[in-house]
Image (cartoon, rainbow, N blue to C red):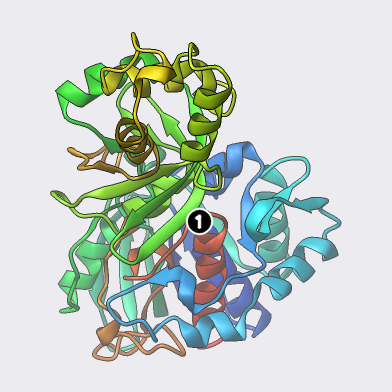
Amino acid sequence: MAREYDVAVIGAGAAGMMCAIAAGRRGRSVIVLDHAGAPGEKIRISGGGRCNFTNIHAGPKQYLSGNPHFFKSALARYTPADFVALVDKHKIAWHEKALGQLFCDNSAKDIIQMLIVEMRAVGAELSLKREITAVEKTEAGFRLQTSDATISACALVVASGGKSIPKMGATGLAYKIAEQFGLTLTETRPGLVPLTLDPGLLAALAPLSGVSVDATLRHGRTVFREALLFTHRGLSGPSVLQISSYWREGDMVTVSIEPDIDLLGLLKAARQENGKQAAQTVLGHVLPKRLAQYLVEARGLASRPLAELPDKLLQGLVDGIQNWQITPAGSEGYRTAEVTLGGVDTNGLDSRTMQAKSVSGLYFIGECVDVTGWLGGYNFQWAWASGHAAGEAV
């Protein structure tokens, strides 16, 4: 005998739990199913364990999608202020970091617990360790087969995420369900992910592993100014993760390290004051010493004092620091990607309700949809907003 509900939600992550809360508040009977042993696993590990749960600047310009207008409705109807009000209601202490990022003072687990409490308050049922083995359309709605039960629901909301971080349980199930019901998928690829370098450049940069600097990264017209981190695989840090969502294989990225410092003027002044100094000594006052040494050695200038370096050579050195053009070899892939770019084509979904236009009662929300935010709480805000939109409609 199938257990019957008004709404079945596949995925107990940020979007799925928010949808269950919104639907439950409207009197709907809801079950949330997940194959994991605990809800909100991506929430738990986010923000270094403190969950960057939203960003006060969240708006259309911080999102990528094949349709740059699709996400506007959901984001306008459930804002960062709305989620902060929920956090405050549960007396969860939080703080703002740079660029409008909001984090829990204590633990990301506070957000998970808040969502569980809210679900319980509206009678939403959480069912974990439930593998979905089959989904089918019925006259009354949908029938879901799990490893040990059959569940019927008038509406089905798919919130099972994308392909990123498979060790956290990412399976791509949402895409299989979308294809099963005839929805189109856009190309999927890792987003907010470290970039790798070819073996030659990687070997040359090996001594810099662990060095972090303030940098501007540019790809076409897209520019991000945040920290850059050299790693044993290539480049990481917030500026690299941000630009990775726009970068494609074969594309070049321009790096400007410490872009606000007039390095040429600094070197010229040092040459005039004491020409016996080495360029790396001067640069080492404003850059990490290991980085200064590498940059000077890479230009073949390490053994020559400043007095022997004409303006042309100094300009070339500075260009190699503040106009450094790199062609990454690739990315670290879904293993470390924070999000999945692409997914369920938004042209097949209603932007107000997240319902599939061609299949009544079928909804897709969160990361599995072709909407991806910048680093810094924007993807959680999309999860809350899209989940709320569907929950208000089912």
In the image, what residue occupies the spot 25% across and 34% down?
Answer: 196
Question: Does residue 35 appear anywhere in the picture?
Answer: no
In the image, what residue occupies the spot 67% across and 43% down?
Answer: 109
Query: Which element type, helix, strand or loop, lies under badge 1?
Result: loop
> Residue 30's spot in the image, x, y percent?
54, 72
> Residue 47's spot in the image, x, y percent?
59, 43
Q: Nearer the viewer, residue 89 or 393?
A: 89
268, above or below 12, in the image: above
Apparent side of residue 242 relative to residue 345 in the rendered image (left or right): right
Find residue 392 and report its image quarter.
bottom right
Question: Does residue 251 appear anywhere in the picture?
Answer: yes
Q: Which residue is mark 1?
A: 13
Amino acid at circle 1: Gly
> Residue 35's spot in the image, x, y percent?
40, 47
Q: Nearer the viewer, residue 135 or 39?
A: 39
Apparent side of residue 110 relative to residue 129 in the rendered image (left or right): right
Find residue 321 and report its image quarter.
top left
347, above or below 370, in the image: below
Crowding at mark 1 (Cα within 10 Å: few <14, some 14-19, many 20+): many
Apparent side of residue 149 relative to residue 73 in the rendered image (left or right): left
121, above or below 194, in the image: below
In the image, what residue occupies the spot 16% across and 23% down?
Answer: 199
